[in-house]
Amino acid sequence: MLLAQLSSRISAQLLALTPLVDGLARCERQFPERVGAWLEQGETLLRELRSPDTSELAALRTSIISAGERRSGESAASSRRAQNLAASTALMRGEELLRSRLLSAEDRLESFEGKLIEAITAAVLVGILPPQEREWSLWLADVWAALAAHQATRPITIYLAAALAPADRLVILDRILIRLTAAKLPVLDVRRGESA
Amino acid sequence: MPVHPQASATEIQSWLAKAEESLREGGIPEASLLATRRVKLLLSLSGAVPGTTGTGRLARIDADARDIMAETLTTLAQVTAREETQLLRWEDVAAEGIRAAAQAKILFQQRGTERSAWLARILIVMASHPASARFAIRLCAAVHVEDALRVLDRAFARCLV
């Protein structure tokens, strides 16, 4: 799976925790079931990544089911409490597993982003950044092509092309150029004027 | 985000929810960690955790809540330190840019303009001069423009010291 896609899907999964916890605060009875469903979604996500943590998420789900089984002489309220406790413990561990995957994906993307920042800086300095005359996504492709064509920036593009999927490269390029263009530096306009 | 050291479990619960929301809005991954801390506290409040029923229940819940508060304050401090380390890295770049711009004699004083407007002009001047351009462009490519100005401001303070 692409790093950017992975990062965004895990982020969305982690964001889904808040309404779940709000439900517990409102004493909603379906809390253990909802945690089970949340873990199952996380499991699907990690399975796509072929992550060994998938089995741990499955085991956490099992622990919730098992805690909900009523022992002889146990009251329904007590069994429910035990299941809530098991669901909470499972939720905490599940969150930890997913967050650690998210942080490592983000770290990886950031390290590549750092290298691309150097290339973009060099591109602006040598004046090879193409003018932004076309639609944003097409411009991103133009910028990448310009970086790949110039000797000052080509080595970084070769490195990034070997390390990242094309979509991930475009995601980090997009982040950098959004920031750079937001700064409205006249130096970018001058280059545009020179190329026109 | 202040919280009283002697805050009750309920006050800590609402403080936790606000801290979680603030991290979520900032796109900080630890927001979900705070959500799980809220779960821990809710369980304690509901009496589901052993020791949170019967005699001394309230004292035990408050003690649990304060433990959770302490853990959360540590998490928040770690998040802040991580963000600061990131900005500090770019502050070094900004400081190098300021030194290069000073040597090229392109810096000018803040006279009659607001600090942020002055910093924005300085950034543009630095990006336009061959001596300092690479630092300014790198900075603008790496962080959002608001952060770039903040970093530049701090770098100026550092250079003056």
Image: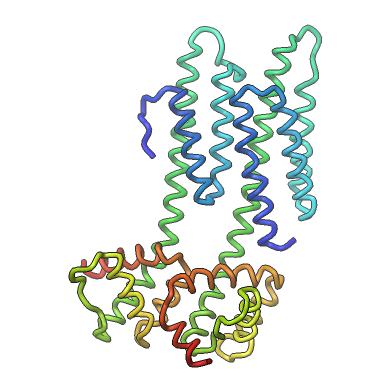
Find residue A153 and report its horizontal and vertical position in percent: 57, 85
The image shows a total of numbered marks equal to: 0
Give the residue drawn at x 65%, y 38%: A93
Find residue A87 and report its horizontal and vertical position in percent: 69, 29
Give the residue drawn at x 57%, y 36%: B35
Quadrant position of residue A69? top right
User: Is A166 rendered above or below residue B40?
Assistant: below
A72 or A176: which is nearer to us?
A176
Position of A59 compared to B99: left or right? right
Find residue B37 and report its horizontal and vertical position in percent: 55, 33
A96 or B139: which is nearer to us?
B139
Find residue A77 and report its horizontal and vertical position in percent: 70, 12
User: Is A128 rendered above or below residue A47?
Assistant: below
Quadrant position of residue B154? bottom left
Give the residue drawn at x 46%, y 83%: A189
User: Is B85 rendered above or below residue A31?
Assistant: below
Q: Quadrant of the N terminus of chain A?
A: bottom right
A103 or B10: which is nearer to us?
B10
User: Is A151 rendered above or below residue B89?
Assistant: below
Give the residue drawn at x 56%, y 21%: B44
Position of A110 compared to B66: left or right? right
A133 or A59: which is nearer to us?
A133
Quadrant position of residue A110? bottom right
